[in-house]
Image (cartoon, coloured by chain):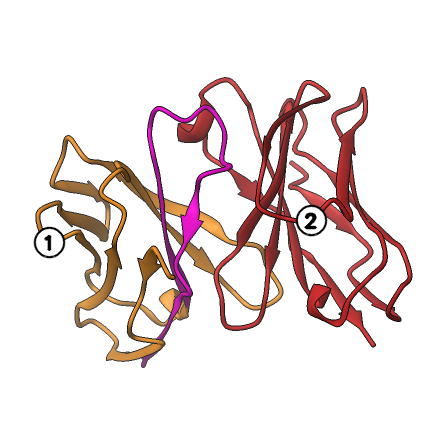
Chain colours: A red, B orange
């Protein structure tokens, strides 16, 4: 069975540019969450979507946005990139029925470097 | 202000011995805790969880202990195997939450199991 897939694997952008990261959940999973992991820190929650609706939002500026499509895949968009946005962006999927106690399955991440 | 702390950035253990990874939290509202394991170039993988109504949860070689009065939890791996070499993240949340937006991850502990 395919796990959570993310694209691209790596990305290099310059300050001020825009980036779109993509995530495909495990088949049958309806919830997708996004996390940012800066080097030396644990993942930090950005967004959760369930059935195309935003279920949760972390403490990130409005430059960060996301959406979920009818096939449950998701995009994370970041506008006006800053050097501090350089990080590993992780996507996680879950069934979505059990709230926080649902097991999350993480993808391998997209490594974003902002120059 | 780190609400979830893992004060040992790294730990080395001999194969076959016990590995003990520690996690401390400051927010007394946390009542659900998880451990994730992360290999390089992969996303975190859920290992084991515990709610505050328990003080121990066991799954094979992995046992998590929770000391609510000390706001401390630990993950025991017995016996340790070379394949356990990875970064381990502790995470905490409030079980009444329906999303992951309050989840806090610790910075991780890198475990090396020496053959």
Rendered image quadrant of residue A22: top right
* Subunit ID for the residue under disc 2: A
Q: Position of residue B33 (x, y in %)?
A: 30, 43
What is the crowding at mark 2: few (fewer than 14 residues within 10 Å), some, or many (at least 20)? few
Q: How many marks?
A: 2
Q: Position of residue A43 (x, y in %)?
A: 52, 55
Q: Which residue corresponds to mark 1?
A: B70
Residue that appears at 11% across and 41% down: B55
Indicate whether B48 appears above or below B53: below
Q: Nearer the viewer, residue B7 or B64?
A: B7
What is the crowding at mark 1: few (fewer than 14 residues within 10 Å), some, or many (at least 20)? few
Quadrant in the picture for the C terminus of chain A: bottom right
Rendered image quadrant of residue B29: top left
> Is label 1 in a helix, a strand or a loop?
loop
Q: Position of residue B31 (x, y in %)?
A: 25, 36
Quadrant in the picture for the N terminus of chain A: top right
Rendered image quadrant of residue B21: bottom left
Q: Are marks 2 and 1 on the same chain?
A: no
Residue that appears at 45% across and 39% down: B102
Indicate whether B4 appears above or below A41: above
* Subunit ID for the residue under disc 1: B
Indicate whether A33 appears above or below B40: above
Q: Nearer the viewer, residue A13 or A2?
A: A13
In this view, which residue lies farthest toward the left?
B69
Q: Which residue corresponds to mark 2?
A: A61
Q: Nearer the viewer, residue B19 or B106?
A: B106
Q: Which residues are magenta?
A: B87-115
């Amino acid at each position: 069975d395919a796990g959570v897939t993310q694209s691209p694997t790596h990305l290099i952008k310059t300050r001020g540019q825009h980036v779109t990261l993509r995530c495909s959940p495990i088949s049958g999973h309806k919830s997708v969450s996004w996390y940012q992991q800066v080097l030396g820190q644990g993942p930090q929650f950005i967004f959760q979507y369930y059935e195309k609706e935003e279920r949760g939002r972390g403490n990130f500026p409005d430059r960060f946005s996301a959406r979920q499509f009818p096939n449950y895949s998701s995009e994370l968009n970041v506008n006006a990139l800053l050097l501090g946005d350089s990080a590993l962006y992780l996507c996680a999927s879950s069934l979505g029925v059990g709230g926080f106690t649902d097991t999350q399955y993480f993808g391998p991440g997209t490594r974003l470097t902002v120059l | 202000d780190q609400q979830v702390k893992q004060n040992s950035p790294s730990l080395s253990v001999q194969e076959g011995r016990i590995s003990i990874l520690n996690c401390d939290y400051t927010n007394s509202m946390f009542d659900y805790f998880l451990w994730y394991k992360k290999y390089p170039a992969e996303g975190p993988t859920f290992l084991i969880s515990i709610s505050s109504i328990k003080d121990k949860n066991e799954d094979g070689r992995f046992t998590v202990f929770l000391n609510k009065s000390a706001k401390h939890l630990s993950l025991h791996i017995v016996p340790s195997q070379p394949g356990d070499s990875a970064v381990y993240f502790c995470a905490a949340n409030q079980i009444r939450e329906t999303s992951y937006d309050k989840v806090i991850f610790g910075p991780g502990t890198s475990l090396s199991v020496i053959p």
